[in-house]
Image (cartoon, rainbow, N blue to C red):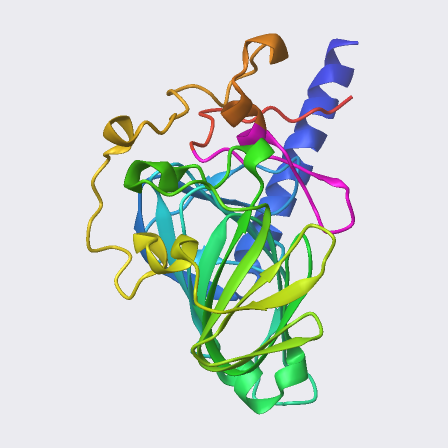
């Protein structure tokens, strides 16, 4: 019996190491070129969460997560780049760049939060090869720089505007095209214009870019210019250290619950990746 447990443990460790080695052997889709705060990545629900640092690789299948008062900039191998604002989750569903326009592709899924992006060679060569899925619609590009942010107040999103006297806007996706042209669902958004997509997936052009985009320093030209933790002054609730440990659901605040789960575009629950990685990761070998 004792030998059986040892063999089972060795087999489990071997499978875990094989999985990790496979990840490390894969070609990265992007690298972290700048970050502040707690930023993590994980390939699947049961794999160990990796804390990201400067110059670390990011792979296809990774979900990159930024914590409160945290942000990260990724540079893709085709020259494209994006910056994730605080409390965001981005899944890199597929990515290939070889210079062959018939094979190259870039598909990402914003699970929650917001980002600012500049497309690279993949989108420039074949516009149909670039897609960004969001909880309410799909974004396409035509040689584009853009920014967007998704709001769900019952997830605790978009409450940070209150510290500058702006009420949280209606739930949905806010998008602004900075350069080029963006397709938000079926709606074309030219440079300088903005759009709003409600939770039913209906998109409307806006008369002017909304404050949720223009006043968000994380989506500005230099999102890393000021990295001060002024959340207490702004009345923003911050998850305490160790909040990634199991907590009785009855003791969680609405914001903590919002940080721990979100819904994908198809309504399925998307697993939570902690912004602060745990010190240990248990692997169930039963």
The residue sitting at 69% across, 30% down in the picture is 12
In front here: 98 or 157? 157
Quick check: 179 left or right of 155?
A: left
The image shows residue 216 at horizontal and vertical percentages of 34, 53
Relative to 222, residue 18 above or below:
above
Q: Is residue 76 visible?
A: no
The image shows residue 116 at horizontal and vertical percentages of 43, 64
Residue 265 on the magenta span: yes
Q: In which image quadrant can residue 48 be found?
A: top right
The residue sitting at 60% across, 23% down in the picture is 282
Relative to 139, residue 257 above or below:
above
Residue 114 on the magenta span: no
In front here: 68 or 274? 68
In front here: 234 or 95? 234
Q: Can residue 134 be seen in this view?
A: yes
The residue sitting at 35% across, 43% down in the picture is 70
Quick check: 164 left or right of 253?
A: left
Look at the image and give the residue range highlighted in magenta: 258-275
């Amino acid at each position: 019996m004792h030998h059986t447990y040892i063999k089972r443990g060795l087999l489990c460790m071997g499978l875990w190491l094989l999985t990790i080695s496979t990840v490390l052997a894969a070609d990265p889709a992007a690298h972290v070129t700048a970050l502040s705060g707690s930023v993590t990545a994980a390939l699947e629900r049961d794999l160990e969460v990796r804390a990201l640092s400067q110059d670390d690789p990011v792979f296809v299948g990774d979900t990159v997560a930024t914590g409160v008062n945290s942000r990260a900039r990724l540079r893709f191998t085709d020259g494209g780049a994006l910056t994730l604002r605080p409390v965001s989750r981005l899944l890199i569903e597929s990515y290939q760049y070889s210079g062959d326009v018939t094979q190259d592709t870039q598909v990402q899924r914003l699970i929650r939060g917001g980002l600012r992006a500049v497309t690279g060679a993949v989108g420039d060569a074949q516009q149909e090869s670039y897609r960004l899925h969001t909880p309410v619609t799909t974004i396409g590009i035509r040689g584009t720089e853009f920014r967007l942010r998704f709001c769900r107040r019952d997830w605790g999103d978009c409450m940070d505007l209150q510290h500058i006297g702006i009420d949280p806007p209606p739930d949905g996706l806010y998008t602004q095209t900075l350069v080029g042209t963006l397709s938000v669902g079926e709606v074309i958004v030219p440079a300088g214009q903005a759009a709003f997509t409600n939770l039913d997936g209906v998109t409307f052009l806006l008369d002017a870019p909304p404050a949720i985009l223009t006043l968000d320093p994380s989506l500005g030209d230099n999102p890393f210019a000021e990295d001060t933790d002024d959340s207490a002054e702004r009345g923003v609730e911050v998850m305490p250290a160790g909040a990634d440990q199991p907590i009785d659901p009855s003791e969680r605040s609405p914001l903590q619950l919002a940080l721990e789960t979100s819904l994908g575009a198809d309504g399925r629950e998307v697993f939570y990746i902690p912004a602060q990685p745990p010190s240990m990761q248990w692997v169930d070998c039963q």
